[in-house]
């Protein structure tokens, strides 16, 4: 519809690379699911080469996504560079003292505890979940569910605040088991349509964090996961799957990195005073529309 698909399954054009790169950079951090949008948008555009390769066990497109994930993670590392310097130093200090006392030291271990559930689940279930659910209709349904999760998180947080029972908490006061629960929430982002940042922010809100701290913890927690997912499959780009797309990878990664940095910069300011509700409305409206289109019209 927008461009002719390349001949080899999974290959993409430079135009597609830029569009998907921008889409990744924005939707990975906005609580609207990058995986869901990477399924829905190509299907709407008629990019059959992309749609078919997303559910494949191996394809050039999946190798292309490796670059986008690495670029997104690097953008997060650059934006939160001061946080990460303190966290890494704090982690090193805890190894020497065997205690976690300062905010940076505790944050290092909170992130480790929060990362373990999605790390294990991703290694075991990422491939079967992708091949089973990386389809437009399923993505639209899960995007609707994602919107309802965001609505539910805001409702429960508001009800707790109105009842006077919502504690005022600093981010580093999270308990390790609470970080583990938020990490478990993050595993649901393996389903196309469920937002990693959205569901972990809801987890933070339910534990008494404000929107800004919930967003900060969500983005810090996502960084090692996104980076590891990219680096784990990086060798694919240097093998046969990377042939013919390395230029597209560079262009798409540049687009993803720039938009990811601008997105996190915007969102950290946005969540100083605002909520998840507009994103919830977007997900429900787009999700229902996609469900009707892919389930009934097509």
Image: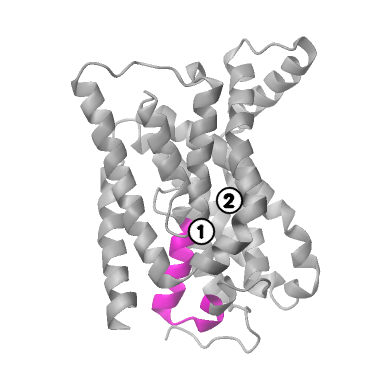
Name the element at disc 1. helix
Residue 69 vertical placement versus 3 (above, below)? above
Total numbered labels: 2
Q: Position of residue 59 (x, y in %)?
A: 67, 74
Quarter of the rendering containing residue 104: top right
The residue shown at (69%, 74%) is 245
Name the residue nearer the viewer: 114 or 6. Answer: 114
Name the element at disc 2. helix
Q: Which mark is residue 24?
A: 1
Residue 13 vertical placement versus 249 (above, below)? below
Q: Is residue 62 left or right of residue 162?
A: right
Q: Position of residue 277 (x, y in %)?
A: 26, 43
The residue shown at (72%, 59%) is 233
The residue shown at (41%, 64%) is 139
Q: Which of disc 2 and disc 1 is earlier in sequence? A: 1
Cα–Cα gap, marks 1 and 2: 8 Å
**Magenta stretch, main secondary structure class:** helix
**Range of residues picked out in magenta:** 34-51
Q: Which mark is residue 72?
A: 2
Quarter of the rendering containing residue 287: bottom left
Whether residue 173 is visible here, answered yes or no, is yes
Whether residue 77 is visible here, answered yes or no, is no
Looking at the rendered image, the quarter that the N terminus falls into is: bottom left
State yes or no: discs 1 and 2 in contact (Cβ < 8 Å): yes
Residue 37 covered by magenta stretch: yes
Q: Which mark is residue 207?
A: none
Residue 146 vertical placement versus 107 (above, below)? below
Name the residue nearer the viewer: 128 or 36. Answer: 128
């Amino acid at each position: 519809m927008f461009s002719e698909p390349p001949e080899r399954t999974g290959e993409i054009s430079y135009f597609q690379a830029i569009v998907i790169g921008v889409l990744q950079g924005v939707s990975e951090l906005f609580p609207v699911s990058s995986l869901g949008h990477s399924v829905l948008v190509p299907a709407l555009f008629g990019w059959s080469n992309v749609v078919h390769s997303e559910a494949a066990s191996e394809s050039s497109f999946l190798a292309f996504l490796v670059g986008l994930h690495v670029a997104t993670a690097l953008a997060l590392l650059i934006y939160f560079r001061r946080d990460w310097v303190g966290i890494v130093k704090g982690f090193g200090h805890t190894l020497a003292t065997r205690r976690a006392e300062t905010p940076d030291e505790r944050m290092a271990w909170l992130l480790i505890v929060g990362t373990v559930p999605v790390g294990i689940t991703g290694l075991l279930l990422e491939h079967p979940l992708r091949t089973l659910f990386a389809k437009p209709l399923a993505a639209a349904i899960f995007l609707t569910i994602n919107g309802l999760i965001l609505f539910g998180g805001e409702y429960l947080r508001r009800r707790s605040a109105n009842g006077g029972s919502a504690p005022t908490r600093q981010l580093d006061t999270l308990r390790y088991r609470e970080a583990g629960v938020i990490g478990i929430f993050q595993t649901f982002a393996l389903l196309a349509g469920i937002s990693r940042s959205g569901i972990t922010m809801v987890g933070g809100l339910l534990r008494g964090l404000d929107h800004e701290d919930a967003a900060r913890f969500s983005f810090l927690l996502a960084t090692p996961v996104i980076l590891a997912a990219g680096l784990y499959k990086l060798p694919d780009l240097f093998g046969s799957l990377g042939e013919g797309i390395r230029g597209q990878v560079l262009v798409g990664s540049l687009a993803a990195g720039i938009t990811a940095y601008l997105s996190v910069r915007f969102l950290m300011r946005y969540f100083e005073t605002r909520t998840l509700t507009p994103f919830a409305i977007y997900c429900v409206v787009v999700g229902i529309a996609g469900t009707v289109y892919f389930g009934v019209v097509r």
